[in-house]
Image (spheres, grey):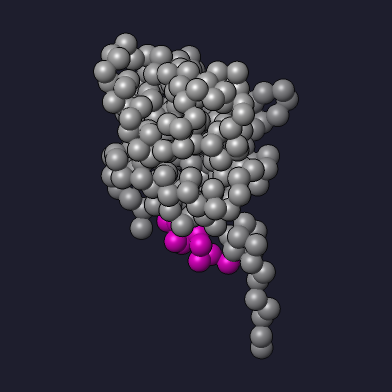
């Protein structure tokens, strides 16, 4: 059954066109407060475009996006971030020539309270102890897994209400992926809502409260994470399981 909680993020009739491509064709969805919602789909389906539209990185053609009841349609990205809606981009996009400490501080650029910044950083070190041991190391010299931890930590420095994550498992070893997704659940348990874009459908659906499937710019299916895991179409197309042959 759909969760009927408070919608934190509402996307309504969203169209995005750029470069002659109609990337999103009127999608509508809600991200409920205190939930993990995952948007699945193949490469080119429009997943990253959707999350970029929400975070102000892509201009909306038609439709509306509301965060905490307020329209954020085509607001500048930094204004959206101030409201508590924070984006961890695909490929991590850390500052390679800055230290771990400097990367984290960049995440708190809207916060002038040094005591609060230090307290938040301590919480991040409790979640990612390795970052504390790498404070003076350049971000570009970290392993892929450590860079992903740093990207999440940098986002958490801004104290998000809703954290959007684009392909957090990309390029990571299975053990690191398991740790990243454990942290995602931990972040949700601390009161942060999660909107997750992820190609590793199996691991994403295991932690998702709600899931949506995007194909060629349209949402064609939605339900609970468990419903998706049990759906034969999803199993065959996204979980790598072959359909069982029919018997007479």
Residue 243 visible to the viewer = yes
Give the dominant element type of the magenta stretch: helix, strand or loop: helix
Q: The N terminus appears in which quarter of the rendering?
A: bottom left
Q: How many marks?
A: 0
* Residue 63 shown left or right of residue 17 in the figure: left
Question: Which quadrant of the structure image shows residue 17?
Answer: top right
Compared with residue 65, is residue 224 higher up or lower down, i.e. above or below?
below
Residue that appears at 57% across and 44% down: 169
Compared with residue 117, is residue 152 higher up or lower down, i.e. above or below?
below
Q: Nearer the viewer, residue 17 or 86?
A: 86
The stretch of residues the image draws in magenta is 221-233
Position in image of residue 167 (x %, y %): 57, 40
Q: Nearer the viewer, residue 9 or 164?
A: 164
Residue that appears at 26% across and 18% down: 115
Residue that appears at 48% across and 41% down: 196
Q: Nearer the viewer, residue 117 or 206?
A: 117
């Amino acid at each position: 059954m759909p969760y009927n909680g408070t919608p934190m993020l509402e996307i309504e009739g969203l169209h995005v066109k750029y470069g002659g491509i109609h990337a999103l064709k009127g999608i509508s969805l809600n991200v409920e407060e205190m939930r993990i919602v995952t948007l699945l789909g193949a490469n080119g389906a429009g997943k990253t475009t959707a999350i970029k539209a929400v975070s102000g990185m892509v201009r909306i053609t038609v439709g509306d996006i509301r965060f905490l009841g307020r329209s954020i349609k085509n607001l500048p990205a930094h204004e959206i971030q101030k409201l508590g809606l924070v984006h961890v981009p695909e490929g991590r996009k850390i500052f390679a020539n800055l230290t771990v400490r400097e990367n984290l501080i960049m995440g708190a650029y809207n916060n002038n309270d040094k005591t609060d910044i230090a307290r938040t950083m301590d919480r991040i070190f409790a979640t990612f102890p390795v970052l504390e041991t790498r404070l003076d190391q350049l971000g570009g010299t970290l392993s892929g897994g450590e860079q992903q931890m740093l990207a999440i930590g940098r986002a958490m420095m801004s104290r998000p209400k809703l954290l959007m994550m684009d392909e957090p498992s990309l390029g990571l070893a299975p053990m690191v992926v398991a740790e990243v997704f454990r942290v995602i659940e931990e972040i949700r348990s601390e009161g942060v809502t999660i909107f997750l874009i992820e190609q590793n459908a199996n691991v994403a659906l295991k932690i998702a409260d709600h899931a949506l499937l995007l194909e060629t710019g349209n949402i064609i299916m939605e339900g609970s994470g468990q419903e998706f895991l049990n759906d034969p179409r999803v199993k065959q197309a996204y979980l790598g399981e072959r359909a069982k042959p029919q018997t007479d």
